[in-house]
Image: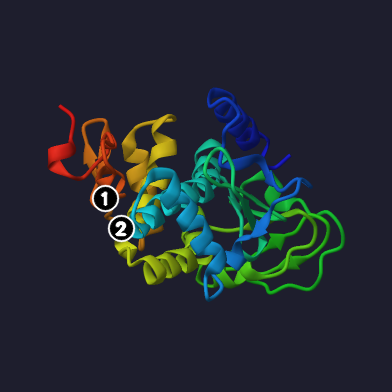
Amino acid sequence: MLLDALSRHLEGLAAERGGVLGVLPGLVADDSPGWIPAADLVREPYEVLLAFVDETAARWNAPRHVAAALLWKTYGYWHTMPMVLGWALHRRVPVMRLEDTLVRPSAAGITLAASRVTVAVLPDDPAAGTVIGTPTETTATATATAVGGTTAGTTAGTMAATLAAPVSGPSGTVVVEDLATVIRAAILDGQRPFVQALSAVARVGERTLWGSTAEAVAHPLLALGPYAEAARLLEEIGPPVAGLLAPDGDGYRRRTCCLWITLPDADPCSTCCVPAARTP
């Protein structure tokens, strides 16, 4: 299957964490109760989102703006992780669009899944030539094959529109020339509404929140290779995540603070940007 390597990797991570993972290893939501459409969280007056923020605040005894940053550090991490691991493991990037993403409270703080997933692949991927079902008429620029049924056109310049196009069945593939462009489009589609909403309701800076997404790109990749690979991907993705991390030894430092260090008696993150918090 398209994402077997990624699912096995996520299952291994879940086992290492005692079963606590903030994204389902198979990415597609199960039929258990409690799933909430992610789009509901970013719909004014943001009552559902604020309920998650206030629960985070109560858990950590944090002011609302700190709780919003910590909630985002969790949500943004689990939304980003499958994309960057898919890129690293097999050059297959799974995209959970905002309208398809589901969320529920969990031991991980929050767990994400999707009702359907689009997988971006390169032209030389064996899946690029696979069409299941009867394709419909498409533009001539490139090919997007949907498992279960349809075909659509795409170029790098119309990536966001392509990812927003309907896909038949629980998952599908889209053939692209540049996977970093897909990740950027997916971040803008699936995360920017949250960043803007959290900034508005909790008065936490957008750059602070995007710093956590930048770390979510880099952190999972450090277990697979040197930071240089993560740095390259961040630069290829570009705004809003490029430039928010700095190389530091074998790893990196953030250029923004996740605000964890502001909690009473909290140990600083190993990547903390606050000089006084850095460990020798």
Q: Position of residue 88 (x, y in %)?
A: 50, 39
Answer above or below: position of 83 versus 134: above
Looking at the rendered image, the quarter that the N terminus falls into is top right
Q: Is residue 33 left or right of residue 216?
A: right
Label 1 neighbour load within 10 Å: few <14, some 14-19, many 20+: many
Q: Is residue 143 left or right of residue 56?
A: right
Instruction: Name the foreground residue: 133 vs 275.
Output: 275
Q: CA distance from mark 1 to mark 2?
A: 6 Å
The colour scheme applied to this rendered structure is rainbow
* Marks 1 and 2 in Cβ contact (< 8 Å): yes
Q: Residue furthest right?
A: 134
Q: Which residue is mark 2?
A: 208
Q: Residue at x 42, y 65 (%)?
A: 198
Q: Which residue is mark 1?
A: 257
> Which quadrant holds residue 220?
top left
What's under tag 1, amino acid-wise?
Answer: Cys
Q: Position of residue 84 (x, y in %)?
A: 49, 45
Q: Is residue 162 left or right of residue 16?
A: right
Q: Position of residue 44 (x, y in %)?
A: 53, 76
